[in-house]
Image: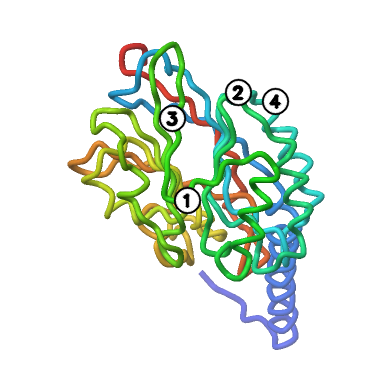
Amino acid sequence: MNTKPISRRQFLKKSAQISLGLLGTASASGIYSHWVEPYWLEVKSIDITIPILPPTFDRFRIVHFSDLHLGVYSRPEALTELVQQIQQVSPDLICFTGDLLDHSVDYISEAVDFCSQLRAPFGQYAVLGNHDAFGTRRAVTKGLAQAGFHVLHNEHAVLKKDGKELYLAGVDDPWVGKADIQQALLHIPDKACTLLLAHEPDFADEYSDLPIDLQLSGHSHGGQVRLPLVGALYTPPHGSKYSSGLYQLPNSRLQVYTTRGIGVTRMPIRFNCRPELTVITLRSPIDS
């Protein structure tokens, strides 16, 4: 087969076309990852079976969200859709697992206005994240409380339904805060069904021998940028092992669910890693 060589002019023309195509693709991807996907919320529903869940809490619905990072990159006006989605779910319980702000208290009023619109029959609970500890701890704690959220600083609450109990514990940020898991679990019976709110998911390895059934975490953002066959290009410290989704720790009763979070930080982009509002339905093994 004879192949006719192309001229220098044809080569340059073809090279220019390829370069322009690649440039256009990169430009389109940049626009999408900056202006589209960070605000394209996914409502992710998942059933989680807990072997010792009291049957009366079967189908108990939890809205779990994390990492708003209001400030440098996130737009407060994007919270309107989030409020609507949470209201549509009609959860029994609302849990927030930290990083309300991104280094600055300038957006605390918007955060309080948003959180004040969220209500559930069994309450609204939160823990602090590492960004909340960067000079905004007091403002975030006060703001969440003002908005009707119970901030769990190494403590727990007891949820009661039809005479049965479900325990909800929370620790201060395990990485840069002063987390005390033993204090958080103090006086909870070992055989009780216990959920834990902890910002960084990978600390689950340290909690795996404790009487905890489900840990809810955020922090990782799912990596923000995930490539096919590669996965996350970057995950923060203590957010790499359990970076997104549901995990069962080996030889432990502990399961971990890590949400991809709502906002962004470091880079104002998301790619193949949409912001996530998680709707968790607890299931008893009797009815699952």
| Tag 4 secondary structure | helix
Q: Amino acid at mark 2?
A: Pro
Q: Amino acid at mark 4?
A: Gln
Residue 227 appears in view: no
Report the Cα–Cα distance between label 1 and label 4. 29 Å
Q: Read off the residue under disc 3.
A: 158
Percent coordinates x, y for residue 116 in the rendering: 73, 40
| Sequence-earlier tag: 3 or 1 | 1
Tell me which corner region of the image, top left, top right, bottom left or bottom right, holds residue 257.
Answer: top left
| Sequence-earlier tag: 2 or 1 | 2
- Identify which residue is drawn at 78% across, 52% down: 110
| Tag 2 secondary structure | loop
Q: Amino acid at mark 3?
A: Val
Report the Cα–Cα distance between label 3 and label 2. 13 Å
The numbered disc on residue 121 is: 2
| Tag 3 secondary structure | strand
The numbered disc on residue 88 is: 4
Percent coordinates x, y for residue 218 in the rendering: 50, 51
Residue 215 appears in view: yes
| Tag 1 secondary structure | loop
